[in-house]
Amino acid sequence: MTDPRPTLLRSREGHAKVGYAELFFDLVFVFAVTQLSHTLLEHLDPVGALRTGLLFLGVWWLWIYTSWVTNWLDPEKVPVRLMIFGLMLGGLLLSSSLPDAFGERGLIYAAVFASMQVGRSAFMLWALRGGRSPGNFRNFIRITLWLLVSGGFWIAGGLAEPDARVGWWMIAIGIEYLGPIAFFRVPGLGRSTLSDWDVEGGHLSERCGLFIIIALGESILITGATFAKLDWNPTTVAAFCIAFLGSVAMWWIYFDSGAARGEHRIAHDEDATRRARLARLAYTYMHLLIVGGIIVCAVADELVLVHPDHADAAGIAAIVGGPALYLLGCALFKWVTNTRRFPPISHCAGLLMLAALWFASAPLHLSALMLGAATTLVFVIVAGWETAALRRMPASATH
């Protein structure tokens, strides 16, 4: 028998709008993106990149799991709002601990992370009680068990010495990221199915698009704040303009057509299994490459602004690697959300140009400013190329 009490779940009639409580929740992750950018900038070496990458994977996973949950839950209901606000508090504590997560605040980071993951899933079980969506209820039993296991490794890492912490947390991240791929298989409970994940595609695509806006906006704020502290001369003004143009080109590459075509594909597919598969692949996994690229590009912009005349190996890796990561993520996202057989040619060409820049930067003794200008030019070429190509195609071929 179905529970007669009012449901906390969204109505599946029509498009599920992104609620104001969800947008309020996202403000915490503006702070998280800033913390990650600054942490990477302060530790721009292989060890620092590995550690910051692990922290980023955790931050993204917290956000995307919450977006999946609010895809089912109705943020207009008071209990759901209170849950979201509780996650905001945890997210603020988590973000504050990021710079010292591999130092004295490791246990705080781990405990808050595990509590947010398990607590949110437990709330979902409570919301699904009483026979509402039995398949998804069993799905969240499995998810909760997986998160309890990964949570043990998070806590163990928080208690370990900083040098050993990376290993524990790599295991924890591995468990969490393998969960959806393994359909959260649990001995005795079996595995979930894609049909259990009754996703509202328009809502999830809108949520991910808004996160891209957040990340791009934060990179612009970092650029503006850095530029404001510098002497305004031709070099710094040029670096500022290059950074801004690069951000605009990044917005263009994602939003001019890719975001809308992806939303059209996932929102209008009547097959629940295909929608869930697309949501898991394109929006859960591939978007982390796009957001990660934006964060590294923000670091690169600050390097070009502050040190325009010099680019060491780490600086070159950031200035070229950030755009490459972003283009790779966008190429894969557009590939799987369209019917084309191959990734966009414009994006593949852009990746080849960036590879050439990487190998040529040291022999040609390119300064950070010149290298930043070159990567921005690559973004502009890719954006213009794709826009021109799509404008020549019939409207029916773009979906």
Image: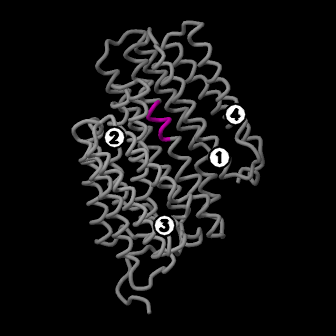
Label count reads 4
Q: Which residue is mark 1?
A: 334
Given residues 6 and 103, the one toward you in this image is 103
Q: Secondary structure at mark 4?
A: helix
Whether label 1 touches label 4, CB < 8 Å: no
Q: Which mark is residue 16?
A: 3
Q: Position of residue 334 (x, y in %)?
A: 65, 46
Whichever of labels 1 and 3 marks the residue nearer the N terminus, that label is 3
- Gap in Å between the C-alphas at discs 1 and 4? 12 Å
N-terminal of the pair, mark 1 or mark 4, is 1
Identified by mark 3, the residue type is: Ala
Using a 10 Å C-alpha cutoff, classify the residue at mark 3 as few (fewer than 14 neighbours), some (14 to 19) or many (20 or more).
Answer: some
Q: Residue 217, percent across and down?
A: 41, 38
Q: CA distance from mark 4 to mark 2?
A: 40 Å
* Eye-nearest disc, 1 or 3: 1
Q: CA distance from mark 3 to mark 4?
A: 33 Å
Q: Amino acid at mark 1?
A: Lys
Where residue 165 is drawn, which disc sits there? Answer: 2
Q: Which residue is mark 4?
A: 346
The magenta segment is 291-296
Q: Secondary structure at mark 3?
A: loop
What is the three-letter code of the residue carrying label 4? Ser
Q: Residue at x 75, y 54 (%)?
A: 396
